[in-house]
Amino acid sequence: MADSVPEIVEGCRLPVLRKNQENEDEWPLAEILSVKEVPGKKLYYVHYIDFNKRLDEWVTPDRLDMKKLQFPKKEAKTPTKNGLPGSRPSSPERDVKRKAESVSLASQVTAATSVPSLPSSTEVSQASVYPTVREPFSTKSRDEHEPITSLTTQNGTARRLIPSQPGRKRKNCGTDEMIKVFQYNSPRSASGFLPPGEDSQDSSDGIPSAPRMTGSLVSDRSHDDIITRMKNIDCIELGRHRLKPWYFSPYPQELTTLPILYLCEFCLKYLKSLKCLQRHLTKCNLRHPPGNEIYRKGTISFFEIDGRKNKSYSQNLCLLAKCFLDHKTLYYDTDPFLFYVMTEYDSKGFHIVGYFSKEKESTEDYNVACILTLPPYQRRGYGKLLIEFSYELSKVEGKTGTPEKPLSDLGLLSYRSYWSQTILEILMDLKSDNGERPQITINEISEITSVKKEDVISTLQYLNLINYYKGQYILTLSEDIVDGHERAMQKRHLRIDPKCLHFTPKDWSKRGKW
């Protein structure tokens, strides 16, 4: 094996030893992106095929399976978009093509009943709410199918459901029309209806739109440069945390050779040594992000930062964020953006937890351009809190909003979970009048939550709640979905309190060049 190792070149593929989540050995196929020599040995930078790029790493020769070495294809002499001849792109571009060839998310969801196809955003009408049986309606015996007789409300009372008129033909419906919400009393595991766990890598959010060349961090599907495919910072010290970056970030070249990059946790200035950081801290007067504090409850605060007034901080924030966001590339013009930084307070100051940015003017109704919870604070509910805060701002602005696409895998999971919980919360709070089924329109859900109606519809379809029955659309809530939602909400301790928000929206269209 020792004689064969020097033959490995960039673009080769072979199995590489790594530990999986259960700390067991596995040999996934990997691509060699770079080779470097250190005293006494060679190191190989590998990308594990079909794994997220944050798992890329430098490995030693003893972890390579030389028996299955694959050399780059000689016929592919024209460099590919990622700069490697014969190498398969490891960027979202491949996913775009694959998604374009596959069916949409709506058609991937198994229909709850044998009914016509799920509605589009222009078809969905008004709905009623019930627990569900995921089987076709039929005239079978009562033992096989419990008839739809009542709607159990939150206070436990049962209300008579009035069956819809039989024989009505299906018609196209607008989002203003009512959807009836049903509950059936046949239990079924909620695993098929609830969002996947946070460890899931599911990212099938439909076909992403074309990349937009705006944004503090803009969509990046090209990966033109081999350099940008490799992590360039080994470790970042930010306050009391040491962070291992997941992706490339364009910090100055001279800093990429350092074992640790030091950041001031208040102004985010980067420094090359601990001594430089200590000297900087004697001069830095900040103990919180610059800008206005627009929210505080307990130890959680949000600061609004204008990308034009605080350019240095905004650019440093983008550099830090790029270490953990692969699907974006840095864009130094921060003037058109607002940054909302969430912090946690203690006796030493306000420590950054995460942030999101948004355009001052968005023609596409985006209320988030980039969003990130720093790794030390992930899986603690802060991601949903950031999302909830972005929609709270949209409510004050009197708008509906949606995040800029494409979302990262973790971002998509967080948004799906938030949308699901928010919409289920609305449906379960519905009250029926005069014995009628509770009814609500897609537009009403959108107006109450400020979630764009396309996201409302996609979430209902993702949860497999919306069905077509006897000439109308219905929403069906099973007991398992209700129970699963209640358990999830019990774990969600962090919520935004609108009374603690002090925010006045600005009309940026009247402010010239921001």
Image (cartoon, rainbow, N blue to C red):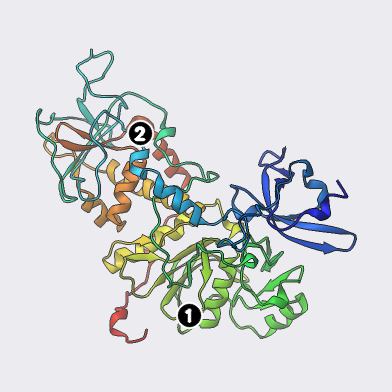
Q: Amino acid at mark 1?
A: Asp
Q: Which mark is residue 201?
A: none
For this view, does 433 lie left or right of residue 73? left
For this view, does 28 lie left or right of residue 201? right
- Badge 2 local density, few (<14 within 10 Å), some, or many (20+)? some
- Badge 1 local density, few (<14 within 10 Å), some, or many (20+)? some
Q: Amino acid at mark 2?
A: Thr
Q: Is residue 386 above or below residue 30?
A: below
Residue 423 is situated, as x and y percent measured from the top left of the image, at: 32, 47
Q: Quadrant of the C terminus?
A: bottom left
For this view, does 8 lie left or right of residue 224? right
**Residue 23's quadrant in the figure?**
top right
Q: Are marks 2 and 1 in contact (CB under 8 Å)?
A: no
* Residue shown at the point (27%, 40%) measured from the top left: 118
Count of labels in the image: 2
Residue 350 is situated, as x and y percent measured from the top left of the image, at: 56, 70
Q: Is residue 46 above or below residue 299?
A: above
* Residue shown at the point (66%, 77%) measured from the top left: 252
Q: Secondary structure at mark 1?
A: loop
Distance from disc 2 to disc 1, alpha carbons, whole Å, reads 45 Å
* Residue shown at the point (57%, 61%) measured from the top left: 80
Q: In front: 280, or 33? A: 33
For this view, does 103 lie left or right of residue 222? left
Res 155 visible: yes
Q: Secondary structure at mark 2?
A: loop
Residue 256 is situated, as x and y percent measured from the top left of the image, at: 71, 71
Q: In front: 68, or 318? A: 68
Residue 116 is situated, as x and y percent measured from the top left of the image, at: 23, 34
Per the image, the residue denoted by label 1 is 333
Per the image, the residue denoted by label 2 is 110
